[in-house]
Image (cartoon, rainbow, N blue to C red):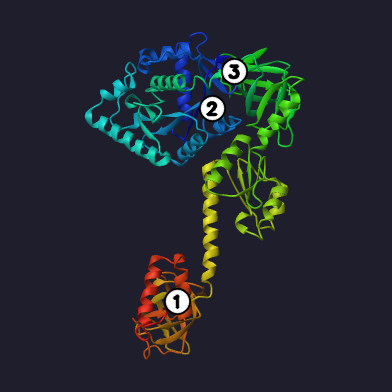
Amino acid sequence: METRKPIVTIMGHVDHGKTRILDTIRRTTVIDREAGAITQAIGASIVPIETIKRICGSLLTRIKTKITLPGLLFIDTPGHAAFSNLRKRGGNLADIAILVIDINEGIKPQTREAIDILKKYKTPFLIAANKIDLVSGWRSDPKKTVLENINSLPEQARMILDQKLYTLVGSIYDASGMRSERFDRVTDHTKELAIVPTCAKTGDGIAELLMVLSGLAQNFLNECLKCDTDGPAKGTVLEVKEEKGLGKTLDVIIYDGSLSTNDILVIGGIDAPVVTRAKVLLEPMPLSEMRDKKSRFKPLKRVIAATGVKISASEIDQVIAGMPIRAATAETLEQVKDAIQKEVDEVIIETDRQGIVVKADSLGSLEALVTLLKDKDVRIMKATVGDITKKDISDAMTNFDADPLNAVVLGFNSAMTRDAEEYNENLKVIVLTNKVIYRLIEDFCKWREDEIKKIELKKLDGITRPYRIELIRGMVFRQNNPAVCGVEVQEGLLTPNTSVMKSDGVRVAYIKGVQLEQKNIEKAEKDKQVAVSMDGVTIGRQIHEGDILYSDMTENEFRKLKELKELLSKDDVSLLKEIAEIKRKQNSLWGV
Protein backbone atom coordinates (compact mmCIF):
# COMPACT_ATOMS: atom_id res chain seq x y z
CA MET A 1 0.00 0.00 0.00
CA GLU A 2 1.23 3.47 -0.87
CA THR A 3 0.10 6.97 0.09
CA ARG A 4 -1.50 8.72 -2.85
CA LYS A 5 -1.93 12.44 -3.44
CA PRO A 6 -4.98 13.99 -1.75
CA ILE A 7 -7.66 15.09 -4.25
CA VAL A 8 -8.48 18.76 -3.70
CA THR A 9 -11.49 20.66 -5.09
CA ILE A 10 -12.14 24.38 -4.92
CA MET A 11 -15.67 25.62 -4.22
CA GLY A 12 -17.43 28.92 -3.61
CA HIS A 13 -19.86 31.52 -4.91
CA VAL A 14 -19.58 32.80 -8.46
CA ASP A 15 -16.93 35.56 -8.90
CA HIS A 16 -15.37 35.01 -5.47
CA GLY A 17 -12.11 33.87 -7.08
CA LYS A 18 -12.22 30.05 -7.31
CA THR A 19 -10.64 29.80 -10.74
CA ARG A 20 -8.11 32.53 -10.10
CA ILE A 21 -6.85 30.87 -6.90
CA LEU A 22 -6.30 27.62 -8.78
CA ASP A 23 -4.61 29.48 -11.63
CA THR A 24 -2.39 31.32 -9.13
CA ILE A 25 -1.40 28.04 -7.46
CA ARG A 26 -0.46 26.61 -10.87
CA ARG A 27 1.39 29.77 -11.91
CA THR A 28 3.27 29.93 -8.62
CA THR A 29 4.48 26.37 -9.02
CA VAL A 30 6.00 27.01 -12.43
CA ILE A 31 7.13 30.60 -11.89
CA ASP A 32 10.80 29.70 -12.38
CA ARG A 33 10.05 27.00 -14.99
CA GLU A 34 11.75 24.33 -12.91
CA ALA A 35 11.60 20.94 -14.57
CA GLY A 36 8.87 18.63 -13.33
CA ALA A 37 7.42 21.20 -10.93
CA ILE A 38 3.90 20.54 -12.13
CA THR A 39 2.24 17.86 -14.21
CA GLN A 40 -0.90 18.68 -16.13
CA ALA A 41 -3.13 15.64 -16.33
CA ILE A 42 -6.63 15.65 -17.78
CA GLY A 43 -8.91 17.51 -15.43
CA ALA A 44 -6.21 17.85 -12.80
CA SER A 45 -3.05 19.70 -11.79
CA ILE A 46 -0.52 17.61 -9.90
CA VAL A 47 1.75 19.63 -7.61
CA PRO A 48 4.65 17.55 -6.22
CA ILE A 49 5.56 17.89 -2.56
CA GLU A 50 9.01 19.28 -3.47
CA THR A 51 7.31 22.21 -5.18
CA ILE A 52 5.02 22.80 -2.19
CA LYS A 53 8.05 22.79 0.12
CA ARG A 54 9.79 25.33 -2.10
CA ILE A 55 6.78 27.66 -2.19
CA CYS A 56 6.04 27.40 1.54
CA GLY A 57 9.66 27.46 2.69
CA SER A 58 9.99 28.03 6.42
CA LEU A 59 6.21 28.28 6.78
CA LEU A 60 6.04 24.47 6.97
CA THR A 61 7.75 24.58 10.36
CA ARG A 62 4.50 26.10 11.71
CA ILE A 63 2.55 22.85 11.28
CA LYS A 64 5.15 20.88 13.32
CA THR A 65 4.61 17.81 11.15
CA LYS A 66 6.92 16.22 8.62
CA ILE A 67 5.14 16.24 5.26
CA THR A 68 5.41 12.82 3.61
CA LEU A 69 2.61 13.22 1.09
CA PRO A 70 3.70 12.77 -2.55
CA GLY A 71 1.97 16.05 -3.43
CA LEU A 72 -1.51 17.45 -4.09
CA LEU A 73 -3.93 16.74 -6.94
CA PHE A 74 -6.04 19.83 -7.72
CA ILE A 75 -9.15 19.33 -9.82
CA ASP A 76 -8.98 21.69 -12.74
CA THR A 77 -12.68 22.44 -13.06
CA PRO A 78 -13.32 24.33 -9.84
CA GLY A 79 -16.70 24.73 -8.26
CA HIS A 80 -19.86 22.80 -7.59
CA ALA A 81 -20.05 20.85 -10.85
CA ALA A 82 -16.64 19.24 -10.45
CA PHE A 83 -17.25 18.50 -6.80
CA SER A 84 -20.57 16.79 -7.34
CA ASN A 85 -19.29 14.85 -10.35
CA LEU A 86 -16.36 13.50 -8.35
CA ARG A 87 -18.25 10.85 -6.46
CA LYS A 88 -17.53 7.40 -5.18
CA ARG A 89 -19.53 4.82 -3.27
CA GLY A 90 -20.68 6.21 0.06
CA GLY A 91 -19.31 9.70 -0.38
CA ASN A 92 -17.38 12.14 -2.48
CA LEU A 93 -14.12 11.60 -4.25
CA ALA A 94 -12.64 14.88 -3.00
CA ASP A 95 -10.51 14.26 0.07
CA ILE A 96 -10.41 17.90 1.08
CA ALA A 97 -11.76 21.19 -0.26
CA ILE A 98 -10.94 24.88 -0.31
CA LEU A 99 -14.02 27.07 0.14
CA VAL A 100 -13.33 30.46 -1.41
CA ILE A 101 -15.20 33.43 0.08
CA ASP A 102 -14.81 37.07 -0.93
CA ILE A 103 -13.96 38.66 2.43
CA ASN A 104 -15.76 41.85 1.34
CA GLU A 105 -19.02 40.13 0.30
CA GLY A 106 -19.13 37.27 2.80
CA ILE A 107 -21.48 34.29 2.63
CA LYS A 108 -23.59 34.13 -0.54
CA PRO A 109 -26.19 31.57 -1.74
CA GLN A 110 -23.67 29.38 -3.57
CA THR A 111 -21.41 29.52 -0.51
CA ARG A 112 -24.25 28.07 1.59
CA GLU A 113 -24.87 25.43 -1.06
CA ALA A 114 -21.17 24.48 -1.02
CA ILE A 115 -21.20 24.24 2.80
CA ASP A 116 -24.31 22.03 2.70
CA ILE A 117 -22.67 19.66 0.20
CA LEU A 118 -19.37 19.56 2.12
CA LYS A 119 -21.21 18.73 5.35
CA LYS A 120 -23.33 16.11 3.60
CA TYR A 121 -20.21 14.28 2.39
CA LYS A 122 -18.28 14.98 5.62
CA THR A 123 -15.49 16.47 3.51
CA PRO A 124 -12.92 18.45 5.53
CA PHE A 125 -12.26 21.94 4.21
CA LEU A 126 -10.52 25.21 4.90
CA ILE A 127 -11.51 28.71 3.88
CA ALA A 128 -9.69 31.13 1.60
CA ALA A 129 -10.88 34.61 2.60
CA ASN A 130 -10.07 36.06 -0.80
CA LYS A 131 -9.71 39.57 -2.28
CA ILE A 132 -7.98 41.11 0.75
CA ASP A 133 -6.42 43.59 -1.69
CA LEU A 134 -9.82 45.30 -1.90
CA VAL A 135 -9.84 46.01 1.84
CA SER A 136 -9.28 49.73 2.39
CA GLY A 137 -5.63 50.49 3.15
CA TRP A 138 -4.22 47.11 2.07
CA ARG A 139 -0.55 47.12 1.08
CA SER A 140 1.28 44.12 -0.32
CA ASP A 141 4.98 43.31 -0.23
CA PRO A 142 5.77 40.13 -2.21
CA LYS A 143 8.83 39.51 -0.03
CA LYS A 144 6.66 39.22 3.09
CA THR A 145 4.27 36.54 4.31
CA VAL A 146 0.58 37.41 4.47
CA LEU A 147 0.79 37.78 8.27
CA GLU A 148 3.80 40.11 7.97
CA ASN A 149 1.85 42.18 5.43
CA ILE A 150 -1.14 42.32 7.79
CA ASN A 151 1.01 43.34 10.76
CA SER A 152 2.70 46.10 8.75
CA LEU A 153 -0.63 47.71 7.83
CA PRO A 154 -1.65 51.04 9.40
CA GLU A 155 -3.77 50.47 12.51
CA GLN A 156 -7.00 51.63 10.80
CA ALA A 157 -6.53 49.22 7.86
CA ARG A 158 -5.68 46.36 10.22
CA MET A 159 -8.86 47.07 12.23
CA ILE A 160 -10.98 47.06 9.06
CA LEU A 161 -9.48 43.72 7.98
CA ASP A 162 -10.05 42.20 11.43
CA GLN A 163 -13.63 43.45 11.46
CA LYS A 164 -14.32 41.84 8.07
CA LEU A 165 -12.66 38.63 9.23
CA TYR A 166 -14.77 38.32 12.37
CA THR A 167 -17.92 39.24 10.49
CA LEU A 168 -17.05 36.27 8.28
CA VAL A 169 -16.47 34.07 11.35
CA GLY A 170 -20.00 34.91 12.56
CA SER A 171 -21.54 34.30 9.14
CA ILE A 172 -19.80 30.91 8.81
CA TYR A 173 -21.20 29.86 12.18
CA ASP A 174 -24.71 31.00 11.19
CA ALA A 175 -24.49 29.12 7.88
CA SER A 176 -22.89 25.91 9.15
CA GLY A 177 -22.89 25.78 12.95
CA MET A 178 -19.09 25.43 12.67
CA ARG A 179 -16.52 27.55 14.47
CA SER A 180 -13.72 29.17 12.50
CA GLU A 181 -10.63 31.30 13.12
CA ARG A 182 -7.72 32.84 11.28
CA PHE A 183 -5.31 29.98 10.51
CA ASP A 184 -2.53 31.16 12.87
CA ARG A 185 -5.00 31.39 15.77
CA VAL A 186 -6.54 27.92 15.40
CA THR A 187 -5.75 25.76 18.45
CA ASP A 188 -7.64 22.60 17.42
CA HIS A 189 -8.26 21.83 13.75
CA THR A 190 -10.85 19.19 14.70
CA LYS A 191 -13.06 21.91 16.21
CA GLU A 192 -12.28 25.02 14.15
CA LEU A 193 -12.13 25.79 10.43
CA ALA A 194 -8.93 27.52 9.36
CA ILE A 195 -9.40 30.82 7.50
CA VAL A 196 -6.48 31.92 5.33
CA PRO A 197 -6.59 35.55 4.09
CA THR A 198 -5.64 35.48 0.40
CA CYS A 199 -5.40 37.54 -2.72
CA ALA A 200 -5.28 35.42 -5.86
CA LYS A 201 -4.38 38.54 -7.85
CA THR A 202 -1.14 39.34 -5.95
CA GLY A 203 -0.43 35.85 -4.60
CA ASP A 204 -0.76 36.95 -0.96
CA GLY A 205 -1.66 34.01 1.28
CA ILE A 206 -1.24 31.33 -1.42
CA ALA A 207 1.82 29.83 0.29
CA GLU A 208 -0.08 29.82 3.60
CA LEU A 209 -3.06 28.18 1.90
CA LEU A 210 -0.83 25.37 0.59
CA MET A 211 0.83 25.06 4.00
CA VAL A 212 -2.46 24.64 5.89
CA LEU A 213 -3.84 22.34 3.18
CA SER A 214 -0.78 20.07 3.31
CA GLY A 215 -0.79 20.02 7.10
CA LEU A 216 -4.47 19.09 7.33
CA ALA A 217 -4.08 16.36 4.70
CA GLN A 218 -0.97 14.97 6.40
CA ASN A 219 -2.45 14.97 9.91
CA PHE A 220 -6.02 13.89 9.27
CA LEU A 221 -6.15 12.06 5.93
CA ASN A 222 -3.07 9.85 6.03
CA GLU A 223 -4.98 6.59 6.53
CA CYS A 224 -7.64 7.56 3.95
CA LEU A 225 -4.94 8.10 1.33
CA LYS A 226 -3.61 4.55 1.37
CA CYS A 227 -4.12 2.89 -1.99
CA ASP A 228 -3.03 -0.22 -3.84
CA THR A 229 -1.28 1.07 -6.93
CA ASP A 230 -1.08 -2.47 -8.32
CA GLY A 231 -4.82 -3.09 -7.96
CA PRO A 232 -7.50 -2.43 -10.61
CA ALA A 233 -8.26 1.23 -11.27
CA LYS A 234 -11.22 2.93 -9.64
CA GLY A 235 -12.31 6.36 -10.76
CA THR A 236 -15.00 8.79 -11.82
CA VAL A 237 -15.83 10.26 -15.23
CA LEU A 238 -15.28 14.00 -14.88
CA GLU A 239 -16.24 15.03 -18.42
CA VAL A 240 -17.21 13.45 -21.75
CA LYS A 241 -15.62 15.31 -24.67
CA GLU A 242 -15.37 15.17 -28.44
CA GLU A 243 -11.70 15.39 -29.50
CA LYS A 244 -10.62 16.00 -33.09
CA GLY A 245 -9.17 12.82 -34.54
CA LEU A 246 -10.13 10.77 -31.49
CA GLY A 247 -13.90 11.04 -31.40
CA LYS A 248 -15.65 10.87 -28.04
CA THR A 249 -13.23 10.61 -25.09
CA LEU A 250 -13.51 10.44 -21.31
CA ASP A 251 -11.72 12.72 -18.86
CA VAL A 252 -11.35 10.51 -15.78
CA ILE A 253 -10.00 10.97 -12.26
CA ILE A 254 -8.37 7.76 -11.00
CA TYR A 255 -8.41 7.65 -7.20
CA ASP A 256 -7.28 4.06 -6.57
CA GLY A 257 -5.23 1.40 -8.33
CA SER A 258 -3.68 1.61 -11.77
CA LEU A 259 -4.92 1.56 -15.37
CA SER A 260 -3.07 0.28 -18.43
CA THR A 261 -3.89 0.37 -22.14
CA ASN A 262 -6.13 -2.47 -23.29
CA ASP A 263 -7.56 -2.97 -19.77
CA ILE A 264 -11.26 -3.88 -19.64
CA LEU A 265 -13.32 -0.91 -18.41
CA VAL A 266 -16.76 -1.01 -16.77
CA ILE A 267 -18.57 2.33 -16.70
CA GLY A 268 -21.89 3.07 -14.98
CA GLY A 269 -24.88 3.57 -17.28
CA ILE A 270 -28.50 4.64 -16.89
CA ASP A 271 -29.93 1.22 -17.80
CA ALA A 272 -26.88 -1.04 -17.73
CA PRO A 273 -23.09 -0.76 -17.35
CA VAL A 274 -20.99 0.07 -20.42
CA VAL A 275 -18.17 -2.40 -21.04
CA THR A 276 -15.24 -1.37 -23.25
CA ARG A 277 -11.44 -1.35 -23.39
CA ALA A 278 -8.97 1.48 -22.83
CA LYS A 279 -7.56 1.88 -26.33
CA VAL A 280 -5.39 4.92 -25.57
CA LEU A 281 -4.45 6.75 -22.35
CA LEU A 282 -3.51 10.40 -22.85
CA GLU A 283 -2.26 13.38 -20.87
CA PRO A 284 -1.51 16.90 -22.15
CA MET A 285 2.04 17.89 -22.93
CA PRO A 286 3.89 19.62 -20.04
CA LEU A 287 2.44 23.04 -19.09
CA SER A 288 -0.30 22.66 -21.69
CA GLU A 289 -3.69 24.05 -20.63
CA MET A 290 -5.94 21.02 -20.70
CA ARG A 291 -9.11 23.02 -21.39
CA ASP A 292 -7.50 24.50 -24.51
CA LYS A 293 -8.81 22.72 -27.61
CA LYS A 294 -5.39 23.15 -29.22
CA SER A 295 -3.66 21.14 -26.49
CA ARG A 296 -1.40 18.34 -27.68
CA PHE A 297 -1.43 15.00 -25.91
CA LYS A 298 1.12 12.29 -25.30
CA PRO A 299 0.15 8.61 -25.00
CA LEU A 300 0.79 6.69 -21.79
CA LYS A 301 1.07 2.96 -21.20
CA ARG A 302 -0.02 3.09 -17.55
CA VAL A 303 -1.30 5.58 -14.97
CA ILE A 304 -1.51 5.19 -11.19
CA ALA A 305 -3.69 6.88 -8.59
CA ALA A 306 -4.27 9.63 -7.89
CA THR A 307 -4.30 11.29 -11.28
CA GLY A 308 -6.36 12.49 -14.18
CA VAL A 309 -6.29 10.88 -17.60
CA LYS A 310 -8.03 11.15 -20.96
CA ILE A 311 -9.25 7.78 -22.21
CA SER A 312 -10.02 6.95 -25.81
CA ALA A 313 -12.35 3.95 -26.07
CA SER A 314 -15.09 2.59 -28.30
CA GLU A 315 -18.84 2.39 -27.57
CA ILE A 316 -18.91 5.21 -25.01
CA ASP A 317 -21.58 7.37 -26.66
CA GLN A 318 -24.02 6.77 -23.79
CA VAL A 319 -21.54 7.55 -20.99
CA ILE A 320 -22.32 10.65 -18.92
CA ALA A 321 -20.31 12.70 -16.44
CA GLY A 322 -20.22 11.61 -12.84
CA MET A 323 -20.43 7.89 -13.59
CA PRO A 324 -18.15 5.45 -11.76
CA ILE A 325 -15.52 3.65 -13.82
CA ARG A 326 -13.60 0.51 -12.88
CA ALA A 327 -10.96 -1.72 -14.47
CA ALA A 328 -11.82 -5.42 -14.57
CA THR A 329 -10.48 -8.73 -15.75
CA ALA A 330 -12.37 -11.47 -17.61
CA GLU A 331 -12.77 -13.29 -14.27
CA THR A 332 -14.06 -10.28 -12.30
CA LEU A 333 -16.17 -8.67 -15.06
CA GLU A 334 -19.63 -9.79 -13.88
CA GLN A 335 -18.85 -8.96 -10.26
CA VAL A 336 -17.62 -5.47 -11.20
CA LYS A 337 -20.69 -4.88 -13.41
CA ASP A 338 -23.03 -5.75 -10.51
CA ALA A 339 -21.13 -3.48 -8.10
CA ILE A 340 -21.11 -0.58 -10.59
CA GLN A 341 -24.84 -0.82 -11.33
CA LYS A 342 -25.71 -1.02 -7.65
CA GLU A 343 -23.78 2.20 -7.10
CA VAL A 344 -25.62 3.95 -9.94
CA ASP A 345 -29.02 2.69 -8.74
CA GLU A 346 -28.40 4.33 -5.36
CA VAL A 347 -28.68 7.70 -7.12
CA ILE A 348 -31.04 6.96 -10.04
CA ILE A 349 -34.12 6.74 -7.85
CA GLU A 350 -37.82 6.13 -8.05
CA THR A 351 -38.76 6.28 -4.41
CA ASP A 352 -41.97 7.99 -3.36
CA ARG A 353 -45.27 6.96 -4.94
CA GLN A 354 -45.96 10.65 -5.39
CA GLY A 355 -43.50 13.49 -5.78
CA ILE A 356 -41.77 15.66 -8.33
CA VAL A 357 -39.58 14.50 -11.25
CA VAL A 358 -35.91 15.53 -11.10
CA LYS A 359 -33.39 15.59 -13.96
CA ALA A 360 -29.70 16.55 -14.08
CA ASP A 361 -26.85 16.49 -16.57
CA SER A 362 -24.62 14.16 -14.55
CA LEU A 363 -24.85 11.52 -11.87
CA GLY A 364 -23.02 13.64 -9.32
CA SER A 365 -25.16 16.70 -10.00
CA LEU A 366 -28.29 14.55 -9.67
CA GLU A 367 -27.11 13.25 -6.32
CA ALA A 368 -26.38 16.77 -5.07
CA LEU A 369 -29.77 18.05 -6.27
CA VAL A 370 -31.65 15.13 -4.70
CA THR A 371 -29.80 15.61 -1.42
CA LEU A 372 -30.57 19.34 -1.23
CA LEU A 373 -34.25 18.79 -2.14
CA LYS A 374 -34.67 16.07 0.48
CA ASP A 375 -33.15 18.42 3.06
CA LYS A 376 -36.14 20.65 2.31
CA ASP A 377 -38.57 17.71 2.69
CA VAL A 378 -39.37 17.65 -1.03
CA ARG A 379 -40.72 14.26 -2.11
CA ILE A 380 -39.18 12.83 -5.28
CA MET A 381 -40.98 10.28 -7.42
CA LYS A 382 -38.26 9.92 -10.05
CA ALA A 383 -34.69 11.19 -10.51
CA THR A 384 -32.67 10.44 -13.62
CA VAL A 385 -29.85 11.82 -15.75
CA GLY A 386 -30.37 13.48 -19.13
CA ASP A 387 -32.68 15.95 -20.88
CA ILE A 388 -36.35 16.33 -19.97
CA THR A 389 -38.38 13.96 -22.15
CA LYS A 390 -42.03 13.39 -23.02
CA LYS A 391 -41.99 10.46 -20.57
CA ASP A 392 -40.86 12.79 -17.74
CA ILE A 393 -43.76 15.16 -18.50
CA SER A 394 -46.17 12.21 -18.56
CA ASP A 395 -44.83 10.90 -15.23
CA ALA A 396 -45.20 14.32 -13.60
CA MET A 397 -48.73 14.71 -15.00
CA THR A 398 -49.91 11.58 -13.16
CA ASN A 399 -49.53 13.57 -9.95
CA PHE A 400 -51.83 16.42 -10.94
CA ASP A 401 -55.18 15.09 -9.75
CA ALA A 402 -53.84 13.86 -6.41
CA ASP A 403 -51.61 16.89 -5.74
CA PRO A 404 -50.97 19.58 -8.37
CA LEU A 405 -47.95 20.74 -6.35
CA ASN A 406 -46.20 17.55 -7.47
CA ALA A 407 -46.91 18.03 -11.19
CA VAL A 408 -43.42 19.47 -11.57
CA VAL A 409 -40.21 18.64 -13.42
CA LEU A 410 -36.95 20.22 -12.21
CA GLY A 411 -33.99 20.21 -14.56
CA PHE A 412 -30.45 21.09 -13.50
CA ASN A 413 -28.42 21.72 -16.66
CA SER A 414 -31.08 19.71 -18.51
CA ALA A 415 -33.05 21.05 -21.47
CA MET A 416 -36.50 19.97 -22.70
CA THR A 417 -36.63 17.92 -25.87
CA ARG A 418 -38.87 19.28 -28.64
CA ASP A 419 -41.29 16.36 -28.18
CA ALA A 420 -41.57 17.19 -24.47
CA GLU A 421 -42.26 20.88 -25.20
CA GLU A 422 -44.99 20.06 -27.71
CA TYR A 423 -46.52 17.43 -25.42
CA ASN A 424 -46.64 19.86 -22.49
CA GLU A 425 -48.32 22.70 -24.41
CA ASN A 426 -51.81 21.54 -23.39
CA LEU A 427 -50.87 20.07 -20.01
CA LYS A 428 -50.41 21.62 -16.60
CA VAL A 429 -46.93 20.35 -15.73
CA ILE A 430 -44.59 23.03 -14.40
CA VAL A 431 -41.06 22.73 -15.83
CA LEU A 432 -38.30 24.69 -14.09
CA THR A 433 -34.69 24.59 -15.29
CA ASN A 434 -31.51 26.37 -14.24
CA LYS A 435 -27.75 25.99 -14.55
CA VAL A 436 -27.24 26.89 -10.88
CA ILE A 437 -28.57 24.42 -8.31
CA TYR A 438 -29.41 26.90 -5.56
CA ARG A 439 -31.33 29.11 -8.01
CA LEU A 440 -33.28 26.11 -9.28
CA ILE A 441 -34.25 25.13 -5.73
CA GLU A 442 -35.07 28.75 -4.86
CA ASP A 443 -37.31 29.04 -7.95
CA PHE A 444 -39.10 25.81 -7.05
CA CYS A 445 -39.59 26.75 -3.38
CA LYS A 446 -40.94 30.17 -4.35
CA TRP A 447 -43.31 28.65 -6.92
CA ARG A 448 -44.52 26.12 -4.34
CA GLU A 449 -45.03 28.79 -1.66
CA ASP A 450 -46.99 30.96 -4.13
CA GLU A 451 -49.17 28.00 -5.17
CA ILE A 452 -49.84 27.00 -1.56
CA LYS A 453 -50.84 30.59 -0.81
CA LYS A 454 -53.21 30.63 -3.81
CA ILE A 455 -54.80 27.36 -2.66
CA GLU A 456 -55.18 28.67 0.88
CA LEU A 457 -56.60 32.00 -0.29
CA LYS A 458 -59.32 30.15 -2.20
CA LYS A 459 -60.74 29.26 1.20
CA LEU A 460 -61.58 32.97 1.56
CA ASP A 461 -63.64 32.98 -1.65
CA GLY A 462 -67.25 33.99 -1.03
CA ILE A 463 -66.49 35.46 2.41
CA THR A 464 -66.86 39.23 2.92
CA ARG A 465 -63.37 40.49 3.67
CA PRO A 466 -62.79 43.22 6.24
CA TYR A 467 -62.33 46.71 4.77
CA ARG A 468 -62.63 50.34 5.75
CA ILE A 469 -63.29 53.02 3.12
CA GLU A 470 -63.65 56.81 3.08
CA LEU A 471 -65.99 58.71 0.74
CA ILE A 472 -63.71 61.16 -1.08
CA ARG A 473 -64.92 64.78 -0.92
CA GLY A 474 -65.88 66.33 -4.26
CA MET A 475 -66.14 62.88 -5.90
CA VAL A 476 -69.91 62.29 -5.91
CA PHE A 477 -71.02 61.41 -9.45
CA ARG A 478 -74.63 60.41 -8.65
CA GLN A 479 -76.54 60.74 -5.38
CA ASN A 480 -78.78 57.65 -5.73
CA ASN A 481 -80.36 54.91 -7.90
CA PRO A 482 -77.55 53.83 -7.65
CA ALA A 483 -75.33 56.25 -5.77
CA VAL A 484 -71.94 56.55 -7.46
CA CYS A 485 -68.91 58.14 -5.78
CA GLY A 486 -65.17 57.89 -5.34
CA VAL A 487 -63.77 56.14 -2.27
CA GLU A 488 -60.31 55.46 -0.87
CA VAL A 489 -59.56 52.08 0.69
CA GLN A 490 -58.02 52.93 4.05
CA GLU A 491 -57.55 49.31 5.09
CA GLY A 492 -58.40 45.77 3.96
CA LEU A 493 -59.73 44.49 0.66
CA LEU A 494 -62.79 46.12 -0.92
CA THR A 495 -64.89 43.76 -3.07
CA PRO A 496 -68.21 44.22 -4.93
CA ASN A 497 -71.48 42.55 -3.82
CA THR A 498 -70.91 43.39 -0.16
CA SER A 499 -72.82 45.49 2.36
CA VAL A 500 -71.37 48.49 4.21
CA MET A 501 -72.15 49.98 7.62
CA LYS A 502 -71.32 53.17 9.48
CA SER A 503 -69.22 53.32 12.64
CA ASP A 504 -72.40 52.91 14.76
CA GLY A 505 -73.04 49.47 13.23
CA VAL A 506 -76.03 50.54 11.08
CA ARG A 507 -76.08 48.98 7.60
CA VAL A 508 -76.47 51.79 5.04
CA ALA A 509 -75.86 50.41 1.53
CA TYR A 510 -75.00 47.54 -0.76
CA ILE A 511 -71.94 47.92 -3.03
CA LYS A 512 -72.91 46.59 -6.47
CA GLY A 513 -69.71 47.32 -8.34
CA VAL A 514 -66.17 48.67 -8.09
CA GLN A 515 -64.48 50.46 -10.97
CA LEU A 516 -60.93 51.64 -11.68
CA GLU A 517 -60.37 53.81 -14.75
CA GLN A 518 -63.92 52.98 -15.92
CA LYS A 519 -63.27 49.22 -15.82
CA ASN A 520 -65.00 46.82 -13.44
CA ILE A 521 -62.59 45.19 -11.00
CA GLU A 522 -63.04 42.35 -8.50
CA LYS A 523 -61.01 43.88 -5.65
CA ALA A 524 -59.30 47.05 -4.51
CA GLU A 525 -56.42 46.97 -2.01
CA LYS A 526 -55.30 49.44 0.64
CA ASP A 527 -54.59 53.02 -0.57
CA LYS A 528 -56.43 52.45 -3.88
CA GLN A 529 -58.90 55.16 -4.99
CA VAL A 530 -61.81 53.68 -6.94
CA ALA A 531 -65.41 54.44 -7.93
CA VAL A 532 -68.22 52.43 -6.30
CA SER A 533 -71.92 52.09 -7.13
CA MET A 534 -74.22 51.61 -4.11
CA ASP A 535 -77.88 50.57 -3.86
CA GLY A 536 -80.29 51.61 -1.08
CA VAL A 537 -78.68 54.90 -0.14
CA THR A 538 -78.74 58.60 -1.01
CA ILE A 539 -75.51 60.51 -0.60
CA GLY A 540 -76.29 63.65 1.38
CA ARG A 541 -78.96 61.92 3.50
CA GLN A 542 -77.88 58.58 5.04
CA ILE A 543 -74.17 59.06 4.21
CA HIS A 544 -72.03 62.11 3.38
CA GLU A 545 -68.73 63.01 1.76
CA GLY A 546 -65.85 62.26 4.13
CA ASP A 547 -67.80 59.47 5.94
CA ILE A 548 -65.97 56.30 6.99
CA LEU A 549 -67.71 53.02 6.12
CA TYR A 550 -66.92 49.42 7.07
CA SER A 551 -67.67 46.05 5.49
CA ASP A 552 -70.81 44.66 7.10
CA MET A 553 -70.22 40.92 7.47
CA THR A 554 -72.36 38.23 9.05
CA GLU A 555 -71.43 36.45 12.27
CA ASN A 556 -70.80 33.29 10.24
CA GLU A 557 -68.34 35.11 7.97
CA PHE A 558 -66.61 36.65 10.99
CA ARG A 559 -66.14 33.24 12.63
CA LYS A 560 -64.73 31.73 9.40
CA LEU A 561 -62.28 34.62 9.06
CA LYS A 562 -61.16 34.06 12.66
CA GLU A 563 -60.45 30.41 11.83
CA LEU A 564 -58.46 31.47 8.75
CA LYS A 565 -56.73 34.46 10.34
CA GLU A 566 -53.28 33.03 9.46
CA LEU A 567 -54.18 33.93 5.85
CA LEU A 568 -54.87 37.54 6.80
CA SER A 569 -52.34 40.31 7.33
CA LYS A 570 -51.81 41.82 10.78
CA ASP A 571 -53.64 44.94 9.61
CA ASP A 572 -56.60 42.82 8.43
CA VAL A 573 -56.77 41.02 11.77
CA SER A 574 -56.70 44.37 13.58
CA LEU A 575 -59.50 45.67 11.32
CA LEU A 576 -61.52 42.51 11.99
CA LYS A 577 -61.32 43.29 15.73
CA GLU A 578 -62.43 46.86 15.03
CA ILE A 579 -65.51 45.61 13.13
CA ALA A 580 -66.33 43.17 15.96
CA GLU A 581 -66.20 46.03 18.50
CA ILE A 582 -68.63 48.06 16.36
CA LYS A 583 -71.03 45.09 16.10
CA ARG A 584 -70.85 44.38 19.84
CA LYS A 585 -72.15 47.85 20.64
CA GLN A 586 -75.55 46.44 19.64
CA ASN A 587 -74.99 42.78 20.59
CA SER A 588 -72.30 42.06 23.18
CA LEU A 589 -72.10 38.37 22.14
CA TRP A 590 -71.79 39.05 18.40
CA GLY A 591 -69.31 36.66 16.75
CA VAL A 592 -68.39 34.97 20.04
| Residue lying farthest to the top in this orientation | 35
* Residue underneath mark 1: 558
Q: Can residue 465 be seen in this view?
A: yes
Residue 326 in percent (x, y) is at 68, 24
Circles 3 and 1 in contact, beta carbons < 8 Å: no
Disc 2 crowd rating (10 Å Cα; few below 14, some 14-19, many 20+) is many
> Tag 1 or tag 3, which sits nearer the N-term?
3
Image quadrant for the C terminus?
A: bottom left
Image quadrant for the N terminus?
A: top right
* Circle 1: residue type: Phe
Q: What element carries label 3?
A: loop
* Residue underneath mark 3: 305
Q: Which residue is drawn at 62% across and 32% down?
A: 322
Q: How far apart are marks 3 and 1 (CA)?
A: 72 Å
- Residue 24, picture quadrant: top left
Disc 3 crowd rating (10 Å Cα; few below 14, some 14-19, many 20+) is many
* Circle 2: residue type: Ala
Disc 1 crowd rating (10 Å Cα; few below 14, some 14-19, many 20+) is many
* Residue 296 in the image: above or below residue 173: above
Q: Residue at x 76, y 20 (%)?
A: 331
Residue 235 in percent (x, y) is at 63, 24
Circles 2 and 1 in contact, beta carbons < 8 Å: no
- Residue 315, picture quadrant: top right
Q: Distance between the residues labelled 2 and 3?
A: 13 Å
> Tag 3 or tag 2, which sits nearer the N-term?
2
* Circle 3: residue type: Ala
Question: In screen coordinates, is 252 left or right of 508?
Answer: right
